[in-house]
Amino acid sequence: MNISDKTPARVRFAPSPTGQMHIGGLRTALYDWLLARKSGGQFILRIEDTDQTRYQEAAEQHIKASLQWLGLDWDEGPDIGGPYAPYVQSQRLEHYSAAARQLIETGAAYEDDTQPKELEALRQRQHAAGQPPGYDNRGRHRTPDQIQESKDKGLDVVVRLRIPDRGKMEIHDEVRGKITFDLSLLQDFVILKSDGFPTYHLAHVVDDYHMKITHVIRGEEWISSIPRHVLIHQGLGIPLPKYVHVPLILGADRGKLSKRHGAQSALEYRDAGYTSDALLNYLALLGWSAGDDREIMQRDEIVQRFDIGRILQHPAIFNSEKLEWMNGSYIRSLDHEALTELLVPFLEAPYSAGGLPDSVKRPIDRCLIMKLAPVLRDRIKLLTEITELVDFLFVDRIDPNPAQMIGRRMDEQMVVKALEMSIQGCAQFEPFSAPVLDRELRLLASDSGMKAGQFFTPIRVAVTAKRVAPPLFETLEALGREKTIERLQKGCEIFSSYLSNQKE
RNA sequence: GCCCCGUUGGUGCAGCGGUUAGCACGUCGGCCUUUCAAGCCGGAGAUCACGGGUUCGAAUCCCGUACGGGGUACCA
């Protein structure tokens, strides 16, 4: 066990509301939550809305809904408050400007009135000369009078942090260990934008300090900016948190995860029929392993075994086949009640959203699903697959294909015989239950001289209009005697007319 | 370009100086069987990216190369 896991950790998930909550962000949130729960600490949600240009109002709700669906409950956050409220950066601007002022006073930072178009021109010149792009620290020696003059003229003024001209910086990351950077390669960077908003660099450092965050868990893309964050800490004279940089999640082609790779956001996975437990389990393993071969682990077990020291150092590749398998495994482990609970909403969804035909009135008879749950469980990997599997139970009319009634090694006579014998039989079986149907239909099959597989095929197709359906006896019982006989008779008619058409 | 990080069967992981390189997904074959699944059994599939060291001994430690990823913004 990692030593840092033993003391209560305060960890935050700090998304910026600029779009949908992607799988990568969700995995980071999960690791935050796992560390907080394991250590008996707090999981904090903080909204980082410092980019006015990319802000999307719906995004914050989407983020919260995603976390809730996955069961990642937060102890402090925008809607519930907490000792360090507010938890939305746009409501904390005075903290950042105070920090920026302090940094200016100590000389760690300075005001810069270099205009955007000047920066753009600089970049173009660098590009033309084949030089690496970058700010050349030209604003370092502005006088207060010059800055004031620019402000009076309404020009843009930003605050930049001064980077030492030379020197190395050695930092420690909980995942990768020691990482060294050459400071001479960095340029002075913006901490306060001209619109008065802080950049990420300043804002998160200030907030993490105020909120007493112990572990900064975030994506690998931030590794390169650690020196900037360390410099801000030093300038402010505040202690460093522990850094935990988690590997990125890539698509099957080793490229960034995008639409091409299927669902992207947590809620899309929900709608595609994944259970939150399965997704949580899969996500936990995407960039972390407990050190043995166990893969299917309950939430509690994952919390217990989670260890930031065992987070992987290389990108994780999202394998949707494995996720599907895992989802199927979770579905199979559900009890009948829980499974029914999950399945019914998918069936009751509008037809256009993958539910039963709209002609079926809602709410549906969930007892039917409950009864069949044991035989349904093994047959679906995604909850959405349920509709296709059981729709015949709910619709009034089905449309069986007579050609499909002729099973392997069967002729037309056999089909007619099987249907007729089963119609007669079904009128008599008492009770009309799966065990009785099992016994009696098998007897009829042997009486008819057919193999069970042959005898049952026309029945299945007549009653379900499918070649592939749930097990027959349970299906017939669920359907009931009356409907079964009605469909068998209808099947008989359809098959007869099919035969006469064939002859013509 | 420069900087940082990584590299074990098709895929995801285990391995932490001595193993017949283990597990899972997928794939192939068999059993079971009323269809389809599930389950069970078995198979194929890895010169541990490559090249140098260190060591009695290296997938494991060091260096280099290749490849992959990230960064290089008044985005996060």
Image: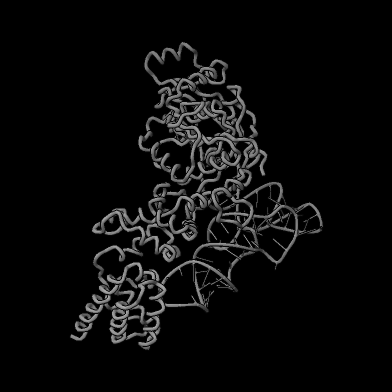
> Which residue is painted at 63% across and 55% down in the image?
A292
Position of the N terminus of chain A by quadrant: top right
The image quadrant where one finds the C terminus of chain A is bottom left
Percent from the top left, x then y, of residue A325?
48, 60
Does the image show residue A48?
Answer: no
How many numbered circles does the render carry?
Answer: 0
For residue A29, side relative to residue B14 (left or right): left
Toward the viewer: A131 or A84?
A84
Q: In the image, is A439 to the left or to the right of A404?
A: right
Q: Closest to the observer: A416 or A257?
A: A416
Which residue does the image show at 49% across and 13% down from the upper left?
A143
A70 to A188, vertically: above or below: below
Residue B53, horizontal then vertical, whole percent: 76, 53
Location of residue A30 with respect to A346 vertically, above or below: above
Report the front residue among A34 and A419: A419
| Residue depicted at x 43% and y 29% | A50
Q: Residue furthest left?
A: A504
- Up the image or down, A95 lies above or below B76; here it is above
- Residue at the location (36% across, 83% down)? A444
Quick check: B76 left or right of A482? right
Residue A263 at x, y percent in the picture: 40, 51
The answer, for residue A338, to whether it is visible in the render is yes
Residue lying furthest top in this view? A145
